Image (spheres, rainbow, N blue to C red):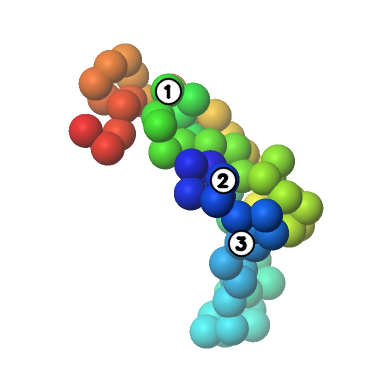
Amino acid sequence: PLFTFAYEDVQPIDFPGEALAPAVADVARWVNYYDRDDVLGYPLRPVSSSYAAVVDADVEVNVGGFPASATPL
């Protein structure tokens, strides 16, 4: 993603995190939905092996044509 280019060792957030109850943490899933036309949308699993370990799926969606899919407009 755009914000990772300045760093060599990119690490994801701790997921699912320590604040969740164990029963919830056991079923928590990180599904990343992105539109390829969105300048901030990007598949996360290929970013690093750390992301691949915590992101369950990258799902491409199409939210429509310009300008709907061109955030941050």
Residue 54 shows in this picture? no
Q: Is residue 5 above or below residue 68?
A: below
Callout 1, which amino acid?
Asp
C-alpha gap between disc 2 and disc 3: 14 Å
* In-front residue for pair 14/2: 2
Which of the marked residues, 1 or 3, is nearer the chain's N terminus?
3
Numbered circle sitting on residue 65:
none
Label 3 CA crowd tier, 10 Å (few <14, some 14–19, many 20+): some
Callout 2, which amino acid?
Phe
Q: Which residue is mark 1?
A: 37
Q: Quadrant of residue 22?
A: bottom right
C-alpha gap between disc 2 and disc 1: 19 Å
Q: Position of residue 47 (x, y in %)?
A: 67, 45
Q: Quadrant of residue 20?
A: bottom right
Q: Which residue is mark 3?
A: 12
The C terminus appears in which quarter of the rendering? top left
Q: Which residue is mark 2?
A: 5
Q: Position of residue 61 (x, y in %)?
A: 48, 27
Label 1 CA crowd tier, 10 Å (few <14, some 14–19, many 20+): some
Callout 3, which amino acid?
Pro
SS assignment at label 1: loop
Q: Quadrant of residue 63?
A: top left
C-alpha gap between disc 1 and disc 3: 23 Å
